[in-house]
Image: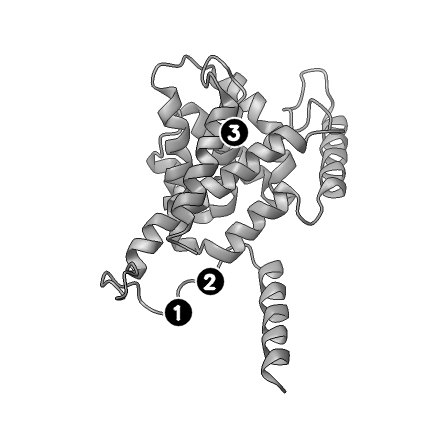
Amino acid sequence: MGKGKRLRAQRVKDQSARQTRELAPEPSRPVSTDDMGGGRMSSYTRREIGKQVYAWMILLSYLEGALDGADGLPENLFAPQAPDESDEGYAARIKTDRLLVETQAMAGSPAEQVAEVLSSWVPRSLVPGVVDHLAAEGLRHLDTATLDPDQWQAGARPLLGILCPPKHWEAALDQLEALATSRLKINDVIAEHLTGQPVATVHAAAALVTWLYGRPNIIADPAAARLELAERAGKFGEFVF
């Protein structure tokens, strides 16, 4: 087999592997703090910067989903069971929501972009750092904001439904509630659940922070904030990729 064919075969193999896994594999070599020469950063430094860049990339995809991905989806997507709603009615509504989300999911969608970042660049060992940086993006806007946790959760649920894989919905909703109650502080309970539900926790944090971008009383100029986030991701991404 020629070199070109081998490279094409490897790309196909790598793409297939990403499609069947949710998080990237752990590095094959130990992380080193030694600079690599020629002005190149150590693998440890690039790994630390990567945690921020991956968080920003995920958040940008969520922001795109918030602007473009909700068309045609019900406003009460993912809403809790109503007092006058039967168990059967609630189950049927959630099933319908699931089918709508799965139908709208397509290659290149914000949901696919988040999945690509996680499966290509974020191994399990980096997830806590990524969640920390997602939370930090929200915390920088929450210092003086008064926020109702119930309203916050209600606003973030549809975003979660649009971008989070359905199999993680239940765990993501639990983490959504916990993170809203703690105002994005990663307490011991959240950290413990993060270990067992890394993908769900990433989505919960991203959904909560994204909702803040739609509140002018919290972020006065969402477009400018989004542009600044994209510029940061591009600038620091040069050190990672």
Q: Earlier in the sequence, mark 3 or mark 1?
A: 1
Q: Position of residue 48 (x, y in %)?
A: 32, 50
Marks 1/2: CA distance? 8 Å
Q: Looking at the image, which is closer to me, 90 or 128?
A: 128
> Which one is in front, 38 or 195?
38
Residue 216 in the image: x percent, y percent? 50, 14
Residue 36 appears in the figure: yes
Q: Which residue is mark 3?
A: 210
Mark 3 or 2, closer to the camera: 3
Q: Residue at x 76, y 37 (%)?
A: 100
The x and y percentages for residue 209 are: 48, 29
Mark 3 to mark 1: distance in Å?
A: 34 Å
Mark 2: secondary structure: loop
Is the C-beta separation of discs 1 and 2 under 8 Å? Answer: yes
State the mark number for residue 28.
1
Q: Residue at x 40, y 54 (%)?
A: 240
Mark 3 surroundings: few (<14), some (14-19) or many (≥20) residues within 10 A: many
Residue type at the position of mark 3: Thr
Q: What amino acid does circle 1 point to?
A: Ser
In what element is the residue under mark 1? loop
